[in-house]
Amino acid sequence: MLFSPALYEVGFAALAGLPYLKHGLDLFLARNRELLRPEQTFHGSLTILLPVWNEAKILEQKLENLVETCQDFKPNLVIIDSASTDDSVSIIERWNGKNSFPSFQLLRMDERKGKTAAVKQALEHINHSLKSDLILMTDADAFFESNTVSNLLKWFSDSSIGCVGATPKRIGQRMEEAGHRSMFSMVRTFESRIDSTPFLEGSCMMWRSDALDSNALNINSNADDAQIATNVRIQGLRVIQDADTHFIDHAPQQRKEHSRQKVRRAQGLQRHLLRQRNHWFNRRHGRFAAILRQEAALHLLTPLLLVGAFVAMLARWATIGFAEVDFSNATLTTLHLGLFASEAILFASWLTVRYGIRIPLLHIIGTIVDGNLQLIRALWNSFRGISLHMWDQHQDGRN
C-alpha cells in the first residue's frame, strides 16, 4: 500500500527535476563560449526612458546620476509619470538639470495602470516624436556606474545585437535574494552565450527602437523587460546580458516585501512565457526556441509537478501513520528511508535560506526550493484571478 504514493512522489519529483537537468547541461556546455564586447562604440541617437511612480524619495538622486553618467552621449530624456500621488512630478518640474539633455520631456498619465502600460505609452511617444536609434530604459532606484552606458552602446556596433542588459550590484539584499539573483544573472549570461536570453533586468536595458513594436507589450501583465527582450529576439536579433557592465540598486530587506516582489515577478514571467507558447517549437528561432521552451518548463511545469510530489508525500506519511506497514520488507524500508532523507535535506536547505545560515551546497538547493515556492504562490494567485501587474515597489532603498 505504501508503494503507490511513494512511487508517485518519486515520479513527480523526477519529472520536476528534468528541466533543471536539461537546461543546466546546456548552460554547462556553453560555459567556455566567449561573448566579447566590441571595442568600437555605436554612433547613433539615444533616448533614455525613465518610468516613475511615487519616487519622490530618490528621484533627485536618480536625475543627478543620469546627468553625471549620460550627458556625454547627448541623449534625449523622457520621463513618464504613472499618476504619482507624492511630489515626484513637482521634483521633476523644478529640476535644474533639464538643459543637460538635447530634449527633455515629461509625460503624465491621468490614471495608474501599471508599469507596462506606462512603458508602452512612452515608447509610442518616442517612436512618433523622437525616432531614436536606441532606447535605454531604467528605473528610479537603479544607479549607473561611470562606464555603464558606454559599455552598453558598444554592443550595438554589432548589427546582430538587438538588446543588451546590464548586471545588477544589489545593496542590502537578503540571503535568499542574493542567491536567487546570483543564479539569475549566471543563467542569463550563459543563455546569452548559447543564443539569447528571454529575460533581462528592466532597471538597465538598451535596445534598438526599430526592433520592437510597442503593440507587442501586454499592459495587463508586468515583466515588461522580459516582454521587450523576447519580442526583440523574435524579430531575429540577439538579446544578451553583459556580465561585466553593472548598475547599482537596493533590494528589499524585509522578507514580506522581498517575497511580494518575487511573487509579482514570477507571475509576470509565467504569463509572458505562456503567451509565447507559439514560439516554443518554432525552428525559425534556432536555439532560442529551446531556451524559451526550457524556461517555460521551469516556470510553469516544474512548480505543478512539485505540488504533485508534495501531495504524494502527504499521502505516503498518512499511509504510514494510519496503516500497518511491514518494514521487514527491505525494498520498502530503503525506499521510505531514502525519501525521508531527501525530504529532510530539502526542508533543511530551505531553512538555511529562510534564516540566513550559509551552508554552500544547501544554500544552492534552498535557493531553488524557495524560488519554486514563489512560483507556486504566483500560480495560485493566477488560479484565483488575482493579478499583481500593478506597479509596486519596496521602500527599503528609498528611506
Image (cartoon, rainbow, N blue to C red):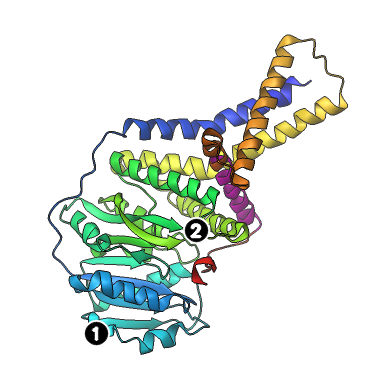
Quadrant that contains the N terminus:
top right
Q: Which mark is residue 172?
A: 2
Residue type at the position of mark 2: Gly
Depth check: 122 or 247 in front?
247
Q: Image height check: is 272 above or below 131?
A: above
The structure residue drawn at horizontal position 49% and vertical position 67%, both measured from the top left corner, is 397
Residue under label 1:
99
Highlighted magenta segment, given as a residue range: 368-384
- Please, what secondary structure does the residue beneath circle 2 have? loop
Residue type at the position of mark 1: Asn
Residue 38 shown in magenta: no
Residue 352 location in percent, x, y?
61, 41
The structure residue drawn at horizontal position 34% and vertical position 44%, both measured from the top left corner, is 189
Image-quadrant location for residue 3: top right
Residue 283 location in percent, x, y?
31, 39
Q: Image height check: is 44 above or below 226?
A: below
